[in-house]
Amino acid sequence: MELVIRGADVIDGTGQARYRADVAVDGGRIAAIVPEGSGARPTAHRTLEADGLALSPGFIDMHAHSDLALLRDPDHSAKAAQGVTLEVIGQDGLSYAPVDDRTLAQIRTAITGWNGDGSDIDFTWRTVGEFLDRLDHGFDGRGIAVNAAYLIPQGTVRMLALGWEDRDAAPAEVERMKALVAEGLEQGAVGLSSGLTYTPGMYASDAELTELCRVVAAYDGYYCPHHRSYGAGALRAYEEMVALSREAGCALHLAHATMNFDLNKGRAPELLTLLDAAIADGADITLDTYPYLPGCTTLAAMLPSWAAEGGPDAILARLRDDAEAERIRHVMEEEGADGCHGVPINWDTIEISGVNDPALTEYIGKTVAASARERAEAPWVTARRLLLDDHLGPTILQHVGHEENVQAIMKHPAHTGGSDGILNGAKPHPRAYGTFPQYLGRYVRELGVLTLEE
C-alpha cells in the first residue's frame, strides 16, 4: 500500500463506537480498514503510527461561503486545517452562477462583504456547469483543495428572470426560473438555496418557491433555505419552510438553524418539537448550525427590503437621500426591519468585522454604537456613512445568540455542522477557521454536550 495509518481509534461517521484499527490508503483512497486482532496487518511504503489517536473521515461543512476563496488559495487552509474535505457552497440564495453580464456585476457588489469584490478573479463562467468546471480545473488543472458541492442560488435566478423588483413573478418568469434551476441541476448542482431575508430572493412568494422546489425534487436534490426570520417570526418561518418543502415533495435542509434575539431565548425545544413531528410523519429534514453565539452577515443585510428594491445602486441612492435615509432609520430602529428579522436593531450588538476600503479599518472590531460614541454622533449616522463610504462592503458580527439554544439544537439527531464562514475582512467570525475544532474541543472534550462519535 501507499500508506498505513496504524493503531488509530477509528470513528467512522456511522455513530457506532470507536474501534482500534489499521487504515490502509492506496491511490489516494482508503483501500482497507483492518480492526485490531482481525487478521494480518497491512504493510505500506509509508507508515504513520497513530497510537490511539482518533481517526475519522473528513468533515462536511454543510454551509460554506468559499465560492471565490476556493479559487484564490490552492491550499485553502482555513477549511483543510480543520479537517474539512467537502464544502457546500452557493448558499443563502446569492452566488455567481448562473449569471449574465448584468447580474454578475450586481452580485459582485451585493455580496462583496462575503467574498470581496472579485477584482482578483477572472469570471470566465456564466453557467453552473462552467463554474463547476472552473473549480475542477483551477490552479493549472490541479483543481481545488477540498471537494465542493453547489446549490443553485434562488435570488440570483430571480435576478436573471425579473431583476430586483418586489412583485410576484409572472407565469412566464416562473417558467424561466424553473428552466434555469433544472439546467443547473443537470450540470451538477445538488439543490437550491434561498436567502429569504436577502433581496431579491425574499420577494418570492411561497407559491413561487414551491414551483422551484418541485423541480429540485424531480432531480433528487434538496432545498436549503435561509428562511424569512430568525427573530420575531422564527417559528412561523420554520413552519413555512417545512410546509413548503412537503408540498413540493422536496428534501429540506435548514440553514444555520438558530433561535436568536432576546425574544427566542430558551425556545429551541419548540423548534425541535416541530421538526420531530414532521420527521415522524415522513418528512426528509436535516439542519446545520455553527457552535458560536454571534451571527455574521453584511451591514447592508440589516436594511429593510424595500430599501434594496432595484439593486445595489438603488440602495446607495436611497442612503444618499436624507429623507429616504431617515425613513430607513425609523424602520430599523423603531419598528424592526425585515432585514433584521423583525427586531428593532440594537447597535451595541453590531460589530464591524471587515471593510473593503483600508481607510475605514478603524471601525473594525468595534460595535457601531461604540464608534458612534467616539464621534459623539447617533449610531445610524455612523452606519449610514460606513455603508456609503464602503459601497455596501462592511461585514458584521451580530451578537444575538443564546448558549442554551445552541447546545439543544446541536444535540438533535438531524443536526450537521456548518460554519457559515465568511473568509473576508480583517476580523472575520472565528467560525470560518474554527467551527470543527470548536465542536470537538469545547462541546465534546470540555463540556461533554456531544460524544466524539456524535
Image (spheres, rainbow, N blue to C red):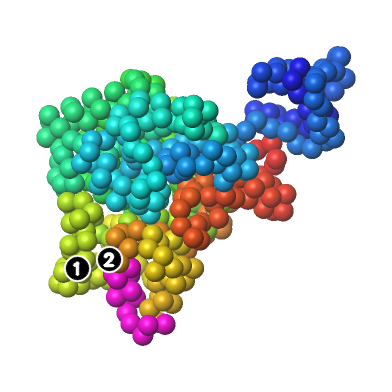
Q: Position of residue 401 (x, y in %)?
A: 49, 59
Q: Residue at x 81, y 34 (%)?
A: 50
Residue at 66% over, 18% down: 27
Q: Quadrant of residue 253?
A: top left
Which residue is at the far top?
A: 39
The residue nearer to you, when weighing 125 against 232, is 125
The residue pinned by badge 1 equals 320
Residue type, label 1? Arg
Majority secondary structure of the magenta segment? helix
| Marks 1/2: CA–CA distance | 8 Å
The one nearer the camera, 218 or 315, is 315
What segment is highlighted magenta in the picture? 374-388
Do the residues bearing badges 1 and 2 touch, measured as CB atoms within 8 Å? yes
Check disc 1 and report its element: helix, strand or loop: helix
| Residue 42 position (above or below residue 121) | above
- Graded by Cα atoms within 10 Å as few (under 14), some (14 to 19) or many (20 or more), the crowding at tag 1 reads some
Please rate how many residues cluster around mark 2, counting C-alpha atoms within 10 Å: few if below 14, some from 14 to 19, many from 20. Answer: some
Q: Which residue does the image show at 38% across and 54% down from the upper left?
A: 113
Disc 2 designates what residue? Answer: 388
Q: Earlier in the sequence, mark 1 or mark 2?
A: 1
Tell me if residue 38 is in the magenta stretch. no
